[in-house]
Image: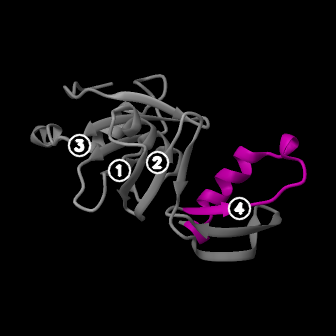
Amino acid sequence: MTKKYNAPFTKVVASGNDFIIFDDKDGQLKSLNLNYSEIASDLCRRKLSIGADGLLVLESSDKAGFRMRIFNPDGSEVDMCGNGARCSVFYAADKGWGNDLSFETGAGILRSEVNDQSIKLRMSDPTDIKTEINLGIGQNMIKVHCVNTGVPHVVHLVDDLESYPVREVGRKIREHTLFA
């Protein structure tokens, strides 16, 4: 961590993804003129800072119970993250904002329900569905499917996940010109 931000945070985890939450629902952080892209790049670095898969900034909203902004570790802001949304809703319920919440994201207004054992999200309807795309990865052709759930996803079905080189193939898919 290279800077002090004088902003309280909470660290949360959902399904293996961890996030840093800045709660600015009351607008107090706005006066600090924080650069959330810079903060995400600084604080999300593993082994050099707090480390996280992203920074979640919760703000007030005129359209819903709160607004969730998501910043990746590289500082880019994205519209939606399912596990980030689950963490935000859990945080909101724990803070007493309610158990049946609507919240604003870059992908639209989402609904959630929190009970003792689970968090349910009503995600935005999927868009940009493309199936059976033949994708050249090195010397191999693989079949992938695409769907946007608020954030674009690529789905590649495999027979044996345990022996499949997920990181290697995933990195090549992510860097493929089709998804640049």
Q: Is 112 above or below relative to 44?
A: below
Type of residue at label 1?
Answer: Met
Q: Secondary structure at mark 1?
A: strand
Where is residue 71 drawn, in percent x and y?
38, 47
Q: Earlier in the sequence, mark 3 or mark 4?
A: 3
Q: Earlier in the sequence, mark 1 or mark 2?
A: 1
Rounded to the nearest angstrom, the CA distance separating label 1 from label 4 is 25 Å
Which residue sits at x=45%, y=36%? 19
Q: Is residue 16 magenta?
A: no
Q: Secondary structure at mark 4?
A: strand
Could you tell whether 122 is left or right of 107 in the image?
right
Q: Which residue is mark 1?
A: 68
Which residue sits at x=12%, y=37%? 32
Magenta extent: 152-179
Rounded to the nearest angstrom, the CA distance separating label 2 from label 3 is 15 Å
Q: Nearer the viewer, residue 120 or 88?
A: 120
Rounded to the nearest angstrom, the CA distance separating label 4 from label 2 is 21 Å
Q: Earlier in the sequence, mark 2 or mark 3?
A: 3
Type of residue at label 3?
Answer: Lys
Type of residue at label 2?
Answer: Ala
Q: Which residue is mark 3?
A: 25
Q: Earlier in the sequence, mark 4 or mark 2?
A: 2
Q: Which mark is residue 82?
A: none
Q: Which mark is residue 85?
A: 2
Residues packed near mark 1 inside 10 Å, few (<14), some (14 to 19) or many (20 plus): many
Q: Secondary structure at mark 3?
A: loop
Residues packed near mark 2 inside 10 Å, few (<14), some (14 to 19) or many (20 plus): many
Question: In the picture, residue 58 is in which quadrant?
Answer: top left
Q: Which mark is residue 155?
A: 4
Where is residue 11 drawn, in percent x and y?
42, 28
